[in-house]
Each structure stands twice: as structure tokens, then as C-alpha cells.
Amino acid sequence: MTHSAELQERLQGEVMSIPAIDVHSHVPAAAPFARSLRDLLGYHYFTELAHSAGMDKSVIDPQNPDDGMIPALVEAMPTLDNTVQYEWMIELARELFGFGERRLTRHNWQALAESVAAKAGQPHREREILTASSIEKVFLTNSFDDDLAAIDKEIFVPCLRADTLVFQFTDEAVRRSLAKVTNVDISTAADSRGALQKLLDRFVSSGAASAAIALPPHFQVFPIMENDLETAIGKAAGGKPLSGAEMVALQNGALFAVVEICRQSHLPVQVMSGALRGAYHHGVPQGTDLPQAGDTLRGLLPLFNSFPEVTFSLSVLSDSQAHELASYGWIVQNVVVSGHWWYDNMPAYIERDLAARVQSVPKTKLIGYYSDMYKLEFGLPKFNMYRRVLARVLARDFVEGGRGTEDEALCVARLLLRDNARRIFNG
Amino acid sequence: MTHSAELQERLQGEVMSIPAIDVHSHVPAAAPFARSLRDLLGYHYFTELAHSAGMDKSVIDPQNPDDGMIPALVEAMPTLDNTVQYEWMIELARELFGFGERRLTRHNWQALAESVAAKAGQPHREREILTASSIEKVFLTNSFDDDLAAIDKEIFVPCLRADTLVFQFTDEAVRRSLAKVTNVDISTAADSRGALQKLLDRFVSSGAASAAIALPPHFQVFPIMENDLETAIGKAAGGKPLSGAEMVALQNGALFAVVEICRQSHLPVQVMSGALRGAYHHGVPQGTDLPQAGDTLRGLLPLFNSFPEVTFSLSVLSDSQAHELASYGWIVQNVVVSGHWWYDNMPAYIERDLAARVQSVPKTKLIGYYSDMYKLEFGLPKFNMYRRVLARVLARDFVEGGRGTEDEALCVARLLLRDNARRIFNG
Amino acid sequence: MTHSAELQERLQGEVMSIPAIDVHSHVPAAAPFARSLRDLLGYHYFTELAHSAGMDKSVIDPQNPDDGMIPALVEAMPTLDNTVQYEWMIELARELFGFGERRLTRHNWQALAESVAAKAGQPHREREILTASSIEKVFLTNSFDDDLAAIDKEIFVPCLRADTLVFQFTDEAVRRSLAKVTNVDISTAADSRGALQKLLDRFVSSGAASAAIALPPHFQVFPIMENDLETAIGKAAGGKPLSGAEMVALQNGALFAVVEICRQSHLPVQVMSGALRGAYHHGVPQGTDLPQAGDTLRGLLPLFNSFPEVTFSLSVLSDSQAHELASYGWIVQNVVVSGHWWYDNMPAYIERDLAARVQSVPKTKLIGYYSDMYKLEFGLPKFNMYRRVLARVLARDFVEGGRGTEDEALCVARLLLRDNARRIFNG
């Protein structure tokens, strides 16, 4: 074994056991782990890849019972057994369910299904999974009307997802729900701020660590005149149709209001930039969004410039913005660079992006990774995939590149996996 | 030799001999291989690079005889002997013409020229070249009025190039030629569909495997109202000038008509996205087009969404879209990812793009490579360049990355080089 | 040590000592090297990274004396000791000032500060630095009203920075200064050309090797009608406000005039494309500009097409254009590809971009690197960083890739580091 390979193996051994904080997931606090194999195979990565490779959508119809859906999906999976997503499934099956095979087949899925069902019944299963994954805490994605009291705060951290508030205030059901939760019947900008304040207060007092919002490609942030916002809210509250300009005023007004309250509450804002929603019309559920090449973060600068005291933890969806994102982390004090999101979440992209970030962004401004998972089991293979790339980049680029020692490399690794998240989100 | 280097060498040994199907070339069926060294050196890669490095355009003037053109171009080539394009020339000279030198010089080109001329006279030369290249079939690019009967179907596969039909219907010569070939004098949308149907039928009955079209950067596909199309065709058929909106209607109407007929005939459509034509005004022939950074595939979504039953084999010209392309292959069922086109056709780009594709796209949806060549000789060095990168990526990323065995890696290689093309295009 | 590692080490040994010409810097001829440690730590890379990581801007206030500023900045630097920028500081401290530590701390900066002050007093210090850096010549960035007589032409080469002339003619102070330097009071297009001619003549007779201009993202070059230019100059000269269209006319008219005079004087033009100025409002001085993803060079084509006899040495700021830039170098005769600018100036980007350039662009059209430095000391670590990447790329890709021998690789290295610059800029 070469010196270089030894170094990498040594670093990897260390990095694999560094505990992580997962700052973005969609884990439901009330059902955090899989009850059946369907909960795992039903993850959109598998359904969308299988559908993309030709599987009929009817397979995953909720009406299709487990013993129809599971074997049919298993049959479809050899078309995608080259992917890292497939490898996630195999790794979690091995590490969390004692599955001993390298491929999932019609002959062996039953054993895995039984193991999933059996493990689901064990007490403290969620803690067992997190321990096996070296994950300390998992941030959630909560709707403004979620019940936060029921959340197990020892391992979960609530986060307010603000998309609905910013983009769907014209939806009457949203307004009604908002009124119910806040006891504020919004008809003016002041009402709106009052309601948002109540919402945020509730989240903060429940231990929320951040607000989060996803913005579409080429979203342009504008500071809005109070008058224009007032008009837009009045119309929306009255159920009247809004012009394009009024929609801009409404959305930006809501965005600025949410961020202003985050500022007052010292709450960082997670911004996920660039998902083109519903782009592919025939996709499976959660398999219809795409990145858009040619996008830019330029349109978000008014937000970062307007709130220098708010920390924005920023992710992009398109690889064509990977360098732009690192550059923002490099000079913009209130932007930290976060994770490798969704379509970027594979070693080929992580490796180069991570090398560039570690070469050019202060190490205290990098949130290394988050899982984006829907069930806790996926934290293990996802974080492990990242840890392996992290060890490789630190070995080859940081240590062999002469910029630091192995101990210093491990210090960087700890910042990226846990310590930065803890400092930034526990403010 | 390290274990890692051994693995790579072993895989490369296997991958180099996997036969390939070349799904996109410009080989003329009637003159598929070089008759003289000029036919090889005259390839636009060499003329454009030599011109770019300072060679006067007059060198390649058709009036300049071979013994003026060839030595002048040979003199210019040391400026570009660092490139992979130059290496293509040397590799094909060595493998197909017994050329024993590493550089082409004023002292040795005559021997190569003689060998080219001598080999051209041998019977079954095209088969000899394909055998040496491990290429089974070569797809052609045929104009709608090409004589398809003369094509040697054992090794060549006709493909209809649809650009003229979609973008040049306002050209009277095109309309006349179309009328001649189809016996339809187009003056309505119905005429147009009838004529296209006749064209496609002729191609399908001659064994055509696909239609192909190149779309410019930021091309926006729109479904068109029948009335608007009728007006546009009427004007164009009458030789009247069209407004911008009418041109949009004409082009999109023709595009949808072509794809609709492909749907009925179960013919995949090859889409090459992003060439900015005639961008550089002073270039040599075929050396004036450029990629455009910042482009996106978003504008093509209405096409993919409108024809879920048609397989689109998609290529992009700009590296800034490499990730977007892989993402489309990942979730869009009727999009397969095809090759590494033109300005992307070099190891530095192929390696990362290929790694990302193999990590994230079902292996059945990847057309690994095509040559885009004008003479059969170039298939050898181009496919071999690709095979070497493929072996390296599979060794380092797939096998060493723990996602599969060597046998599984070779299975992926066979899909990318041949089996996917055979399944997708022989439908 | 593997054969591969030996090759790389051998090539690196050779490449490290190849002398370089630095075609773009901001070194002030009158104060080319550091007089104090503050001159080094005050480089915007350190102040912006430290500020980005949380340091208060007041630290670098000019009013803050050295013994307030230096220790405060040193305290901030552990947040960024992972970066290549930090490594530049350590390498130059070691190589030029005998600093023996790997990290700069509150305990050891004083020794370095003393060494900087002591070295500053030694005769011929600028030559000593350049010799230690293997840099032969350093191009400057001169304002049109700079005193060129005082420049030490043995080591420095004047270059006219044209940004002010093209973008700030509406500024009265600029017009006054221009009138003073040229003795031309501009009120017509002819006056403007006369003044520019005088400026350029002065630069050429002082040994200037190029003009340089930075263009913002998505800048669109238009050839302007003489009448429109006349109107725009008239208004600007009269201090009247210009419409958007008139600003376009004024800027493009000035740009074409500058380039036309460069054409007549056989002066290459360095174009730096893509800096979004003042994007981040709260940054430190020189730390407020950002790249913009999604940008394209397409808008510059009218310039390259209009002046086929002028060599444009082109750089981009956004990684999303790296492939586009290489493609321009590939086919556009009068475009040469230059360096790795600013936000792209780190090994993760240089390595892939350089590999692609050496694979696809004639070796005579590559200006490998420039420093962009403000003090001579930074030439050493920057060029050495580049030389190491260059050696690695040539070893792995060029020699091991079978495209050339070690000697040929060194020939490529010499072209990229020195010989191309000498040929192109000494025309």
C-alpha cells in the first residue's frame, strides 16, 4: 500500500466515527423510522429512478398492497444498481438490518422485509439508528401549523419551513390555517407581521433552530414599498386575483417579514436555491422537480445585503452554481455554505465542490452535509458517503497538498460534520 | 504496480475489446473512408485548430492541390500536438496505416499519404476499419432527400436529420426539394404532415433508427395553436415574410409534427442541444460554431412532456449543462443521456461527466459514446479514448468505490458501448 | 514510490524552476514590495476572508495603527488557515522572510514583522524577490494618467487599464484628467479618438505591452453608429444625463475606439470578463465583487469578430464559463486563453481547467498564469501553486495519457509560463 493510500485509510478511519449534526431533513417526528420495507423502497430516489428506467407508475400506487408493490419495485431495481442511491439502500440494509447480500433480489427481499418489521418494534429504535449512524441531532422540516410539543427534543430540532407563508398566502386554506394557529385574521401588512411573529415565537420557544425556505431558479429578491405590500395583502386576504407585480410584492413582503423576525430572534435562515418544481409532468410523487443550469445567486443578494445580522445557510441545486456558492461563502459574512443538495448529492460532485470549499472558504463557514432524508435509516449511508469523500479530499488535497497536518485535517472534519452546525444554529 | 493500477489495467484490457454501436456520425455512405491523407487532415478539428493557431485559411482552399495543402497543414500542426485531437490522428495512423512515428512532420507525412492511398484501394476497407475499431454499426446523418437505397445496411444505419425541415421551410429550395421527394406541394398544415409522414415512412422502411435534430442555445419549445401554424405555413409556402411569432409557430409546428410521426413509428429522436451556429465569423468551414455557457434544457421540457412515449436521446454542447443533462436522465423516463459531444469530447470532461452519470442515472439509460465522425477512420481513436476513460471511471469509482464487482463493471461497460444503443434504437 | 509518483516529482522539480512572465498584476511600480507586515496581511484575500469569518471591519480601518491592526488580523486568521490563500502567506513568509512556522500566531508574528521591515531596507529587494520567485517580468496595471517614466522597465511592463475610459467618461473628473493628460478637450467623437490615440502613443512609446479592460457579466458588445456616438459624446462632454441607449453608445464607442487604436499599434488587449462589482454591500475594500454563474462570452463575440487582427487575451471569473473559454481558445484565432482569475485561482479549479485546455487548445495559445498581485511577494506562492498543478496535470494527463514525452511536457510548461507571453505581448 502506498503512503498516500495509507494516509487516506487512516484519515477515513477517524472521520467515519466523527459524530454529525444533520441540519436538514424531512423526517416526521411521529414516525421517524421505517415500519416496513415499503417505507424504505418508497423513498423517491428509488421510485423515480425505477420509473425513469421504465417501471410503470401503478406499481407505487398507494392502493397497491405491499406484496404487490415491493416485489415489483425490487424487480425494477437491477436497472439502477449502478447508482449511489442503490448503494445507500444496500449499506443501510447491511448496517441496520443485518442484510448480508450485495444486491436486492426477488429471492432475498423477504428476509430484509422481516428484519425491517422486527426492528421497528424494538424500543428506542430511533436512538439505535442514530448511534449506528454517528448522528447526534436531526433537524426537522416543520409546517407552521405542526404540533411541536410532541417532538422528542433530545434528538430532533424543529425548523420552520417558510415556503407556504411566502408563496401560498393567496391560497384560502393557508390563510384559514394561519388564522387558526395564530388567532390573527390577516387583512393588513401589520396583521401579517403580527401573525408571523406569533408563529416564530412559538417555534423559538419550542427550540427551533432555523427557518428554511426553497426559492425557485432566478428568483429575484426586491425590497418592497409598504404601500405596495399593503395593497397586495389586502387583495390576497380578500380573495381577489393579484397582478404579477402584486404577487412580487406579496412574496417579497412576506419573505422580508419572515427574515426580519428571524433577525430579531437570532434565528439563521436556510435557503435552498434552484428547484424547478413540477418540471417533469409524468414523474412519480416527489420525482417531478429538476435543477436549472444557467441559474445565478445574484437575485438573492438584496436579501443577504438587507440583513447583515442574519446568517443564511445557503445551498444550490445546480452544479453550474457550485463555484458561485463557494464564492459567496468566501466573501459574504452572513452566508455560510451548506451541504450538497439532492441532484448534487453524489461523490462526483461532492468531491470537487468540497475541495474547492476547503481551499477557499473559512473552515468555520462550512456546513459539511445534511441528509434531506425522510426516514432516519438513510442518514447512515448518506453521511457515510460524505465522510468517505471528506476523508479523501482532506488526505489528498489538504494533507498531501501541504496545507495542514492530519490532526488539523480532523479538526476541519469535525467543524464540517458537527461543530459549525452547533455554533451557527445554537447561536 | 499498485493493486489499484492493476485493476485499472485489467479492466481496460477488457473494455478495449467490447464492440460498440456508434449512434451518431456524419459518415457519407458512398465514401465512408479516406481516399487520401487530405481526407483525414482536412477534418475540421485539424483545420480549425491549425487556423486558430495562426495558419492562413488559404491553405485549405479547395483550389489548393494536395501537395500544397498537406505539407502546409503538416507544418502548422506542431502548434497543436499537445491536444487529444492530434493524438487521434497519430493513433489512427498507427493502428490503421502502420505509421510508426509519434509526430507527423514534413519528413514523414509522405509515407502516411502513400499508405492511405494504398489502403483505400483494398476491398472491404470499411469493414476492415470497423473490425480494427471494434465498432459494429455506424449511424448516419441523412438529409430528407438522400438516396437510402444505396446504403450498405449491414454496417450503416440511416437517420433522418430534421433540422432542415424544422428551421428552413422558409427556404424555397427546401420546399421545392421536399415537394419533389414526397410528391406533396405543401400549402397547409395537413399537407405538411402528409409530406413528413411520407418522408418518415421512407426512412423507416429503409431501416432508419432515429430522427435527429440540433437545437440552438435557449431554444424554447412551445405547443402551437393549429390556427397559428396554418397561417405560418400558408405564408411560408407563399414565399411571404414571416413575423417573429409566425417563425416560432412554423418551427414549433414542424418540430411537433416530426416528433408526432416518430411517436407513431416508434422512432427515438436524437436531440443535440446548444450549438451557436456561425458565431465566429472568420473560422474555417465547420469551425465557426461555439457552445454557449449559461444555457439550460428547461426550454425543451414541453417537448419531453408532450411526448412521453417518444425516447429522446439527449446531448448537450456546454459543460455548464453536464449536471442538468444527468439530472434529466435521472428522472425523465423518456430522456436517455447520450455521449460527450464535440467541445465536451475530451477526457477532462468525459471523466467527470461519466462518473456522475454512472453514479446517478440508471445504467440502462446511458448511451455511452458516439463518434460524430466524417470518415470511418476516426471511430478508432475516438472510441478508444472513451473506452480508456470508461475503464478508469469504472475501476476507480465503481469497483474501488464499492458499488460493484469487476464483472458488474464490464456489464455496465457493455450497456454503455453497445447494448443500450441496440435496445433503444432497434425498439 | 510508484512510477507515477516518481514521474510527477521529477516533472515538478523541473517545472518549479522555469522562469515566468506575469502578464497581469496590480503592483505599484513605486512601491512594489512590502514595507511592513501590514502590507502583506492587508491584501484583500486576507481581510475579506477574515471579515467573512466574523472579524470586525474596524480592524482594518486605516486609522487603526499597525500594532492594533496586525495582531487583531492575526487573531482572526485561524478561521481561514485551511485555505490556499493562507498557505500563500505561509509560503512567502518562509521563502522570502525566513519564517520557520507553519501557522502565524500572536506569539510569532513579531519576528515576521521584523523580517519584513528589515528586508524592505535592502537594496534591489524587488530583484531579489523576483529571482526567488523565478519571475522575469511583471506587467503592471496603469491608469491613463500614470507617470510611466518612473517605471523600472527592466522588470516591469506598463499596461493601460482602459476601464475608466470606457465606463467613466460621464464622470467630470475623468474628463478633466483626460484633457490634462492629452491636451484634448473632448466634445466630439473625433476628439475622443484623438485623445485616445495620444494616450496610447504615450503608452506604446513607454514600452506598454497591452491594454486591459474588465467587462461586467452579460456585457453585450454592439458596433455603434457614428451618429449615435456623436450624440452620446456630446451629451457626456456637456455634463448632460444620458439615456440607457446613449450610455450603450458611449461605452461601446469608446471600447471600439480603444481597440481600433490597439489594432493600429499591434497591441494585444487583455479582457477580464465577469466581475459583478459592488455586489456585496458590507464587504471590506476590494472584497465586494462576486462572480455570476450563468454568464456567457457570447456578448463579446462582436468584439472578437470585428477585430480579427487584434489578439484578445481572455479570462473569465465564473467557473461556469471555464469550458466556454477553452472553446473560444480552440477555434477563435484572435483569442488566447489566459490564467485562472481570482475566484478561480485555486487548485481545484485550475487542475481541471488546465487539463481541458492542454487537451483541446493549441499550446501556443495558452497564457498559463498571472498573479493579479498587489505586492511582488505574492508572485512566489501563487506561481508556485500553479507550477505544482501544471506539473501534476502534465504528468498524469499529458505524459501518462500518452500524448507526449517528459521533454515535450516541459516544452508545454515553458510555453505556458513564459514563451507564449513573450511572443504574444512583445509582438
Image: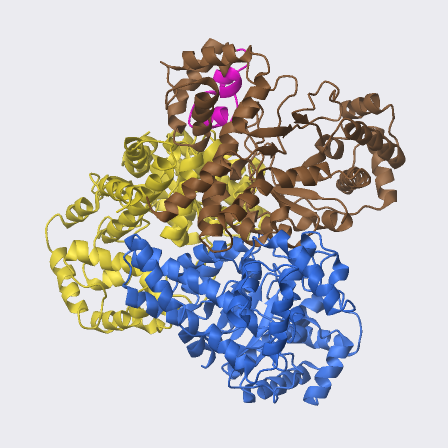
Chain colours: A blue, B brown, C yellow
Numbered range of the magenta stretch:
B38-63
Which of C258/C242 is in front?
C258
Q: How many marks?
A: 0
Residue B87 lies left or right of residue C382; in this view the side is right
Q: Position of residue A118 (x, y in %)?
A: 61, 77
Q: Magenta segment, principal secondary structure?
A: helix
Q: Is residue A1 magenta?
A: no
Residue C314 lies left or right of residue C121; in this view the side is right
Residue C92 lies left or right of residue A191; in this view the side is left
Q: Position of residue C3 (x, y in %)?
A: 28, 41
Classify B274 as above or below B281: below
Q: Position of residue C382 (x, y in %)?
A: 29, 50
Q: Is residue B269 visible?
A: yes
Identity of the residue drawn at 38% across and 48% down: B4
Which of C122/C149 is in front?
C122
Classify A189 as above or below C417: below
Q: Is residue A301 visible?
A: no
Identity of the residue drawn at 69% across and 41% down: B424
Which of C102/B387 is in front?
B387
Which of B253/A151 is in front?
A151
Quadrant showing the C terminus of chain B: top right
Q: Is residue B46 magenta?
A: yes
The image quarter in which residue B20 lies: top right
Quadrant showing the N terminus of chain B: top left
Identity of the residue drawn at 49% across and 65% down: A339
Q: Position of residue C261 (x, y in %)?
A: 41, 33
